[in-house]
Amino acid sequence: MRSAAKLQLSIMMFLQFFIWGGWFVTLGSYLTTALGTSGSQTAMAYSSQSWGALVAPFFVGLIADRYFNAERVLGVLHLVGAALMYRLYWARQFADFYPYVLAYMIVYMPTIALANSIAFRHLETARSQFSRIRVWGTVGWIVAGLIISYVFAWDSPDALAHGMLRNTFLVCSAASLLLGLFSFALPATPPKTAIKQVPTLRRVGGWDALMLLRDRNFVLFFVASILICIPLAFYYQNANQFLTELRETNATGKQTIGQASEVLFMLAIPFFLNRLGMKVTLLLGMLAWTVRYLLFAFGNAEDAAFLLLLGIALHGVCYDFFFVSGQIYTDSKAGERYKSSAQGMLTLATYGLGMLIGFHVAGLITDLYATGKMHDWHSIWLYPAAFAALIFVAFALSFRNDALSIPTRENAPRDCVAHRQL
């Protein structure tokens, strides 16, 4: 792989996740302090991510797989996103805020699958190289959190009271503009599917990747991806608000411990996949969610603060071992024709259906244990801990290790879908 292309893909990933981490982590704290939202309203705002993920397969399947270069679509979407993020900066009421955050996430979520697709297309061996590129997205997320918490201290009690977290939208608008322009300089990623094919609804929507669901093992993985995102939604929606309510100093900055852990474990993914196999790696990711939420349930900002930090540090195992490994698993199953569609379908499963349900459930449970502006976090965190444990047991009993889970370019069939007769 050329060094110039590797650098370009790394910058793409850095900006892609700098934008997301720069406002999404602190969204719950911002909404409750600056806009006075309830748990259900906060869940409604976070659910905009899921609605965006639900339309992602259309963008990716129609454009990246069939008609237009993926890097150009990525650029256009981020330029539109920059304008919408700027509008969020000026919103002062939830009724004004919600339409723009919904529109933004509809624009942003397809870019995750597009960025993955662009990276996979220009990698020689996805198993060994993708994690080295994707890790720069995690670095971008970390840098965003450190800037918010330690450079500007926008998440401090005084800054929260004055709505200073609003500035995160302005910073992310500028970053989105930069990535939008930079995307047009990325390596050309034209569609591989023949444009002369009859444009049926199935093809236009990118639903050709549904052929993967003929494989029993992939169906189990797909369903598990949806279900495990329900406890994931609790973390995204509640973690920052949880830490700030406990008056944990530099809460956003401390959450970057999770991304630092993610960097280490992401680089170790090839080792774990080779030594343990796909099934055990995925199971370790699921188990880590249960352990993390139990640590949150019994931790506090005083004598048990170390439990909170340990729970945050588990993010590397939680995210990388299931979600990044799952992207590699999906890529190995898809074959050349459906790589982009398959990544879009995975985005639908994880950030779409699963988290749409998860955010709704998290909002209801958060309101159930609310007293004024405070919450019984011990009771709240026990719910996702129990649910993750149930998914772990079910997956362990049903999923089989698959030899195609971790292929290389050299030993993988030319078209995994055809080879497996999916």
Image: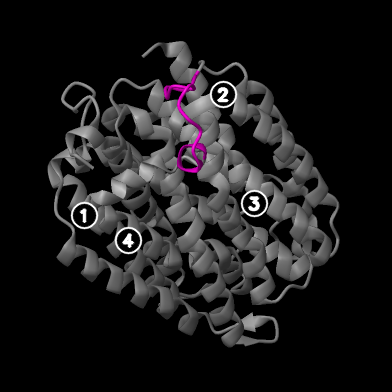
Which numbered disc, 3 or 2, marks the residue closer to the eye?
2
How far is mark 1 from mark 4, CA to CA?
12 Å
Residue matched to label 3: 149
How many tags in the picture? 4
Please rate how many residues cluster around mark 2, counting C-alpha atoms within 10 Å: few if below 14, some from 14 to 19, many from 20. some
Q: Is residue 212 visible?
A: yes
Residue matched to label 4: 224
User: Does dot 1 land on a helix, a strand or a loop?
Assistant: helix
The percent coordinates of residue 44 (x first, y second) are 65, 67
The residue at 38%/65% (across/down) is 227
Please rate how many residues cluster around mark 1, counting C-alpha atoms within 10 Å: few if below 14, some from 14 to 19, many from 20. some
Please rate how many residues cluster around mark 3, counting C-alpha atoms within 10 Å: few if below 14, some from 14 to 19, many from 20. many
How far is mark 1 from mark 3, CA to CA?
45 Å
Q: Between residue 219 and residue 262, name the one nearer to us.
A: 219
Q: Between residue 396 and residue 421, name the one nearer to us.
A: 421
- Mark 1 and mark 4 lie on one chain; the one further toward the N terminus is 1
Q: Is residue 143 visible?
A: no
- Which residue range is magenta in the image? 189-204
- Mark 2 and mark 1 lie on one chain; the one further toward the N terminus is 2
The percent coordinates of residue 20 (x first, y second) are 60, 45
Is label 4 in contact with label 3 (beta carbons under 8 Å)? no
How far is mark 4 from mark 3, CA to CA?
34 Å
Which numbered disc, 1 or 4, marks the residue closer to the eye?
1
Q: Where on the picture, by quarter, is residue 360?
A: bottom right
What is the magenta segment's predominant secondary structure? loop
Which numbered disc, 4 or 2, marks the residue closer to the eye?
2
